Amino acid sequence: MKHTAKGSLLTDIILETFKLNGLLVSEGDQLVKKLGLTSARWKVLGALSSGLGPMTVPDIARAMGQSRQAVQRLSNEMVKDGLLMTQINPGHQRAKFLILTDHGKRAYENAMQKQIPWVNAIASELKEADLEVTSSILKKLIAHLDT
């Protein structure tokens, strides 16, 4: 069996996405290192800053596309470091809600203040129409795979 032309192109996109993810994690780690964060911690803060309210570890894992175990480990560390705190979840006895502390909110805001000029500089080299198409296609792929 062989790839179709579109299957081959999508395979190339998937491989490039893997590479891009690694580069983004590395860049993100460097961007927020002086804030005492990592890309992984930044993602957790971002999920909780989304405005959806308190979230459980499984909620965050789904939002981030990460394993529940990885998010549990991170959130435990972040609670100890004062970035997050737990709250009773009336809908589930064991799955507590995680919420940002004031320290966590400031850390996320500081990370975003570093991200904005970084991303704006990269975006300035790209066409808006290309970015819109890329965003649309990525959202379609995620919707297809996120079942």
Image: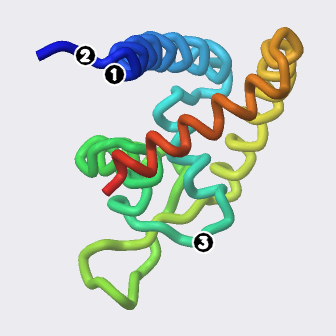
Q: Residue 111 occupies which quadrant of the picture? A: top right
Q: Amino acid at mark 3?
A: Gly
Depth check, mark 2 against mark 3: the one in front is 2
Dot 3, crowdedness within 10 Å: few (<14), some or many (≥20)?
A: few
- Pointer 1: residues within 10 angstroms few (<14), some, or many (20+)? few
Choose mark 3 or mark 1, whichever is in front: 1
Question: How far across and down, in percent of the image, does residue 120 sit?
Answer: 85, 21
- Distance of mark 2 from mark 1, alpha carbons? 5 Å
- The colour style of the image is rainbow
| Position above or below: 3 against 146 | above
User: In which image quadrant can residue 89 be found?
Assistant: bottom left
Q: Nearer the viewer, residue 34 or 47?
A: 47
Q: Is residue 22 visible?
A: no
Residue located at (88% from left, 15% from top): 124
Can see residue 17? yes
Residue under label 1? 7
Q: Which mark is residue 3?
A: 2
Local SS, label 3: loop
Q: Which residue is mark 3?
A: 53
Badge 2 amino acid: His
**Is residue 46 found left or right of 21 in the rendered image?**
right
Q: Answer whether labels 3 and 1 touch (C-beta < 8 Å).
A: no
Residue nearest the viewer, comparing 128 with 113: 128
Quadrant of the frame with the C terminus: bottom left
